Amino acid sequence: MKSLRLSLAGFGVVGQSFVKLLNSKQDYLREAYGIDVRLVGVGNARHGFIYREDGLDMSLLLELSASNRPLTDYEYVRHWDTLLKGLPETGANVLVEVTPTNLRDAEPGLSHIVAALRQGAHVVTANKGPGALAGAELLALARQQGVQLRMEACVMAGTPVLSTLLDGMAGARIQSVRGILNGTTNYILGAMADGRKYAEALAEAQAQGYAETDPTADVEGYDTLAKTLILAALVFNQPLKPEQVERQGITAVSFEAVQQAELEGKRIKLIATLQRSADGLEASVAPHVLPQNDPLARVVGVTNALTIQSDTLSEVTVIGPGAGGLATAQGLLADVIACAR
Ligand SMILES: NC(=O)c1ccc[n+]([C@@H]2O[C@H](COP(=O)([O-])OP(=O)(O)OC[C@H]3O[C@@H](n4cnc5c(N)ncnc54)[C@H](OP(=O)(O)O)[C@@H]3O)[C@@H](O)[C@H]2O)c1
């Protein structure tokens, strides 16, 4: 039996979904994979970081959160006011990092990840900031430390797109990828195709919980940009800076343009493109008018998809959920299992 000791940075939607999933899969992980996974530390912004050498009771943690009680109400644990202070004093060998994505300086996730890698722990994350802004440097640090840094949940949540590209298609030379990597914008464009104006479609996406109150990161294409940068660094081994990627969101896409595309039997989609070129790698995030026979044209609602061109498999398309607590937790769990293996 292999034993993993996990610390969790961030106990919000994804952090709690991950704890729920891990709690429900404990027996299955032992039986099917021979892995004993113990959650030993949890931190958030408001209550700092708690740690228990023998493992924390996951049901109790979820109960605390459900009843709006602070993590510090957990008795007989060690406590620090920040995760960065506590982490070096603990014996966790995997950090699961799920603090908010920040595309300005990638903090606080970047510091958490660097600290964990430096102390020889594997890192599994759904936080797009560190991979987007410093993916290549962090992967180099992980290699130097002899540990893994895994980001499956950053791109298309638990839908296995990074593992398809990096493991499943090992040996193939990836020529290009094109994808719908943001469910909110795909939902809004779909609602506009069905006859709703932008403001109405956005309000509907917010009411369904797909869009944030401030939808800028989604509708201006920043979320898709972050995923594009991660793909550039991890899959093409050619890290790009945000300013090297042309970025357009969907706010300039008119209702008339969407309707006209419909009349012509086409679909407007927000597409991330990465394509090898003579100069290296060309990348963009922009709305495209797609013909109906394009596999991405048929991807509806909040679903995500990535179409991959390579030298050996011509075209492969991976389609699946791109957000949501459980879907993202699945991506984290798969990466935790990969670390144990
Ligand atoms: N939600 C999704 O469907 C989805 C899908 C794919 C990827 N992701 C990514 O997953 C990450 C988490 O998303 P989420 O929806 O769970 O966000 P969330 O609900 O806002 O939770 C974020 C958590 O991080 C904690 N946090 C913030 N600053 C911290 C710090 N300095 N130290 C320790 N903890 C800190 C917050 O603490 P408090 O509770 O005290 O505020 C909160 O518990 C984000 O990077 C997001 O982009 C999310």
Image (tube, rainbow, N blue to C red):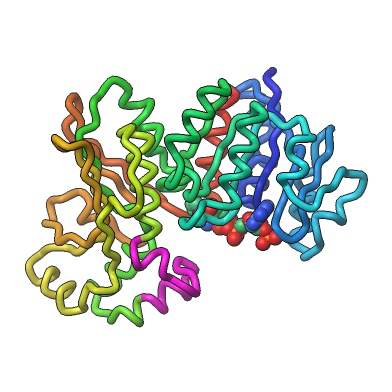
Q: Position of residue 59 (x, y in %)?
A: 77, 48
Please say if 199 is above or below 288. Answer: below
Residue at 11 percent across and 56 percent down: it is 291
Q: Position of residue 88 (x, y in %)?
A: 74, 35
Q: Relative to residue 341, is residue 188 drawn left or right?
A: left
Closer to the camera in the image, 341 or 42: 42
Residue at 75 percent across and 59 percent down: it is 65
Please say if 266 is above or below 168. Answer: below
Residue 9 forms part of the magenta stretch:
no
Image quadrant of residue 316? top left
Give the quadrant of ligand 1.
bottom right
Q: Which residues are magenta?
A: 202-221
Q: Quadrant of the C terminus?
A: top right
Q: Position of residue 89 (x, y in %)?
A: 79, 35
Q: Quadrant of the N terminus?
A: top right
- Inspect this view and state whether residue 11 appears: no
Q: Relative to residue 325, is residue 68 drawn left or right?
A: right
User: Residue reaching furthest left?
Assistant: 264
Residue at 42 percent across and 35 percent down: it is 136
User: Residue reaching furthest right?
Assistant: 76
Residue 209 forms part of the magenta stretch:
yes
Q: Position of residue 95 (x, y in %)?
A: 64, 37
